[in-house]
């Protein structure tokens, strides 16, 4: 096993940079699938499939990088992450099902797109992290 | 769980950051432990006690009222 003198803080920072790279690549490849299909290669199926596979690859890389980052967090940081993720998952489930019911029953005039749910999830996660960090620190 | 970390740290002239680096946790975690908002795991509690050269019960005291 390779010995290392790198501090936990420096390792966390380095892993955070890796996570940023994978996340940015995932977002850009998502845009490439959609806009590439429409604008760049005029619907050529194999190019769309290739871009989609690339998007999946970056997505899985992002998940793996996040998993590695959580392994480098200390116990309080993990607790904050766990509580925030639990709250986000629960609220997204309730809001997602509720949103779908509103759409099915035509109680909302617009279509219940998944983008709204992702936005809601992001806001919940950021708010939970902020509240939990304030609570403990 | 009650603790004497703030006093012991002052005696050794250590900052929260110094202690955090020595124990391998973040400064925020040391701050939360000192303020008794967060109970550390046993390995972390032992590392802190070892750093001050004291038995764990001289640094941490169980407080039944705190739950």
Image (cartoon, rainbow, N blue to C red):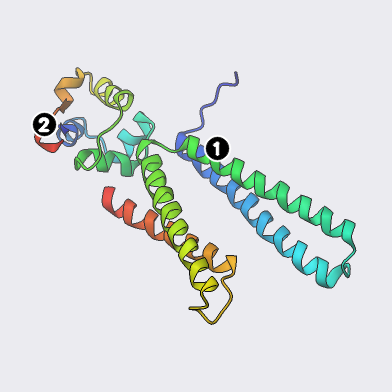
Q: In the displayed structure, would residue A132 be above or below residue A124?
A: above
Q: Quadrant of the N terminus of chain B?
A: top left
Q: Which residue is mark 2?
A: B64
Residue A137: tell me if it is visible: no
Residue located 43% across and 54% down the image:
A88
Chain letter of the residue beneath label 2 in the structure image:
B
Residue situated in front as seen by the camera: B55 or B67:
B67
Query: Would residue A37 be found to the left or right of residue A15 on screen?
Result: right
Which residue ends up furthest to the front in the rendered image?
Answer: A105
Residue A47: tell me if it is visible: yes
- For marks 2 and 1, give the one nearer the viewer: 2
Q: Secondary structure at mark 1?
A: helix
Which residue ends up furthest to the left in the rendered image?
Answer: B65
* Residue B10 image offset from top left, x and y in percent: 18, 35
> Disc count in the image?
2
Chain letter of the residue beneath label 1 in the structure image:
A
Residue located 66% across and 49% down the image:
A59
Q: Quadrant of the C terminus of chain B?
A: top left
Residue located 87% across and 67% down the image:
A43
Residue situated in front as seen by the camera: B11 or A119:
A119
Query: Would residue A85 be found to the left or right of residue B12 on screen?
Result: right
Q: CA distance from mark 2 to mark 1?
A: 36 Å
Residue situated in front as seen by the camera: A119 or B59:
A119
Q: Are marks 2 and 1 on the same chain?
A: no
Query: Would residue A77 be found to the left or right of residue A58 on screen?
Result: left
Q: Which residue is mark 1?
A: A68
> For residue A68, which quarter of the picture?
top right
Q: Residues within 10 Å of mark 1 (few under 14, many from 20)?
A: some
Q: Secondary structure at mark 2?
A: helix
Q: Which mark is residue A107?
A: none
């Amino acid at each position: 096993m390779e010995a290392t003198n790198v501090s936990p803080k420096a390792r966390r920072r380095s892993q955070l940079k890796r996570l940023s790279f994978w996340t940015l690549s995932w977002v850009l490849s998502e845009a490439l699938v959609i806009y590439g299909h429409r604008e760049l290669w005029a619907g050529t199926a194999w190019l769309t499939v290739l871009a989609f596979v690339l998007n999946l690859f970056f997505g899985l890389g992002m998940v793996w990088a996040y998993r590695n980052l959580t392994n480098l967090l200390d116990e309080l940081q993990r607790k904050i992450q766990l509580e925030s993720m639990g709250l986000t998952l629960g609220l997204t489930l309730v809001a997602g099902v509720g949103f779908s019911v509103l759409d099915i029953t035509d109680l909302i005039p617009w279509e219940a797109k998944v983008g709204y749910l992702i936005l809601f999830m992001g806001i919940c996660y950021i708010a939970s992290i902020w509240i939990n960090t304030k609570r403990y620190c | 769980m009650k603790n004497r970390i703030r006093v012991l740290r002052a005696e050794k002239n250590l900052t929260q950051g110094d202690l955090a680096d020595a124990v391998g946790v973040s400064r925020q975690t040391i701050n939360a432990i000192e303020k008794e908002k967060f109970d550390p795991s046993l390995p972390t509690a032992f590392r802190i006690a070892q750093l001050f050269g004291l038995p764990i019960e001289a640094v941490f005291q169980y407080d039944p009222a705190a739950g």
